[in-house]
Image (cartoon, rainbow, N blue to C red):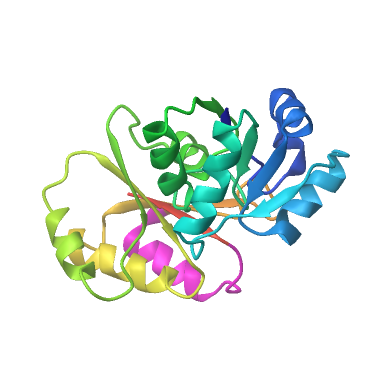
Amino acid sequence: MLYLVSTPIGNLEDMTYRGVRVLKEADFIACEDTRTSGILLKHYGIERPLLSFHSHSGVAKIDKILEALTEGKTCALISDAGTPGISDPAYALVKAAIAANVTVCPIPGASAVLSALVCSGAHTHDFRFLGFLPIKKGRKTLFDSLKTKDYTVVVYESVHRIEKTVSEIGETFGAEHKIVIARELTKKFEEFLRGTAAECLTELKTRPRKGEFVVVF
């Protein structure tokens, strides 16, 4: 059995009872960064063997996990934060597990995408999540493809490119286009910045460049 266990995106209290139980009972835990996950596991008194599985893990690491799974062992897969498979390397392992007839079981919980979306005030019945936008190649093409959108768009953005992204939203859809920026979700300095692209860009320039961002527009 391969469990996809959602972990907190900031506040450690957002871990579910079921998630804690599955992590305690799993034969081993596959995680992106053993140091980052170690903080969560120590907090909940979870002591299980850890195996690193990240974006640079090759086929050999997937094969190693699959070998254990097909032998009847259970693996709990976690990301550094949030739900595995959302902008992280879980996809390749899940695809391989399904192909090997291994049961994949979701343990739902925190998700930055949904947390930002439901608090944004934007309509939620039709939305598109794009993860992190391309850094250079394909970026303009992607924005141009969204010009006629009639749905809500949700993207992740880093502190290094948040101003650039908000500026490009204004250039593509107009300076008066309404957006919502969520920063440091569930953490001590959580905040939502709402307004036009122009207003939000101006506000961002006056704030310290810290945190992780989700942009809804």
Q: Nearer the viewer, residue 134 or 214?
A: 134
Q: Is residue 6 visible?
A: no
Q: Nearer the viewer, residue 43 or 26?
A: 26
* Chain part drawn in magenta: 195-211
Task: Give the position of the N terminus as an image quadrant.
Answer: top right
Q: Residue 116 in the image: x percent, y percent?
A: 49, 43
The residue that appears at 15% across and 65% down in the rendered structure is 141
Q: Is residue 118 left or right of residue 208?
A: left
Q: Is residue 188 left or right of residue 171?
A: right
Q: Residue 89 in the image: x percent, y percent?
A: 47, 53
Extreme right residue here?
45
Q: Is residue 157 visible?
A: yes
The residue that appears at 75% across and 24% down in the rendered structure is 17
Check residue 208 for magenta coloring.
yes
The residue that appears at 37% across and 34% down in the rendered structure is 99
Q: Is residue 153 left or right of residue 90?
A: left
